[in-house]
Amino acid sequence: MSKHAVKYWNVLSESSRNRWQALEQTNGMIEQVTLSKDDETGEYTRLTRFKSGADTSSFGSDHHPYPEEIFIISGRLYDQTNKAWLEQGHYANRLPNEVHGPFFCEQECIVLEISTSKTL
């Protein structure tokens, strides 16, 4: 199986606002929208929006058993583990189990995330 086909739509338009979902325990400071997902493998493409002042320190750092690519579309985000500001245009290809976060955001930041496979 593969990711579901999606017709063109503007994820950032006001009419798409209801598709974004706040992450639990973030007081609405972090939202995500899944752009596509393969239900069989778990692979996904999504956007995550960190609002100004978002801080994931209470969650600690993170890692997962699958590779993940990220691209900063807008704004900037501080990765505390890597001690680096990730700004518009930054890209990373995270290997399985690579530690990242927690994150802090001074201004709104939108991140594109692409998982390669959750089942490998």
Image (cartoon, grey):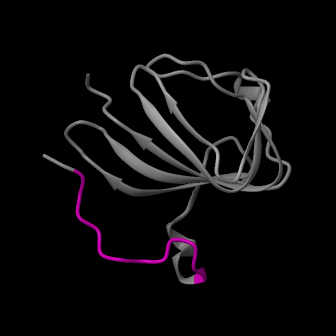
Q: Is residue 13 magenta?
A: yes
The residue sitting at 71% across, 22% down in the picture is 60
- Would you place residue 66 above or below residue 105 in this image? above
Q: The C terminus appears in which quarter of the rendering? A: top left
What span is colored magenta in the figure? 3-14
- Would you place residue 8 above or below residue 41 in this image? below
What x and y, as percent, mark residue 2? Answer: 18, 49
The residue sitting at 56% across, 47% down in the picture is 71
Between residues 108 and 21, which one lies in front from this camera angle? 108
Q: Residue furthest left?
A: 1
Magenta residues, dominant SS class: loop
The number of discs equals 0
Q: Is residue 85 magenta?
A: no
Q: Residue furthest bottom?
A: 15
What x and y, as percent, mark residue 45? Answer: 40, 50
The residue sitting at 52% across, 76% down in the picture is 16
Between residues 97 and 33, which one lies in front from this camera angle? 97
The residue sitting at 60% across, 18% down in the picture is 99
From the viewer's perspective, is 2 left or right of 53?
left
Classify residue 13 by image quadrant: bottom right
Classify residue 102 by image quadrant: top right
- Would you place residue 34 above or below residue 23 in this image? below
- Would you place residue 28 above or below residue 54 in this image? below
Between residues 108 and 76, which one lies in front from this camera angle? 76
What x and y, as percent, mark residue 28? Answer: 71, 54
Between residues 106 and 56, which one lies in front from this camera angle? 106
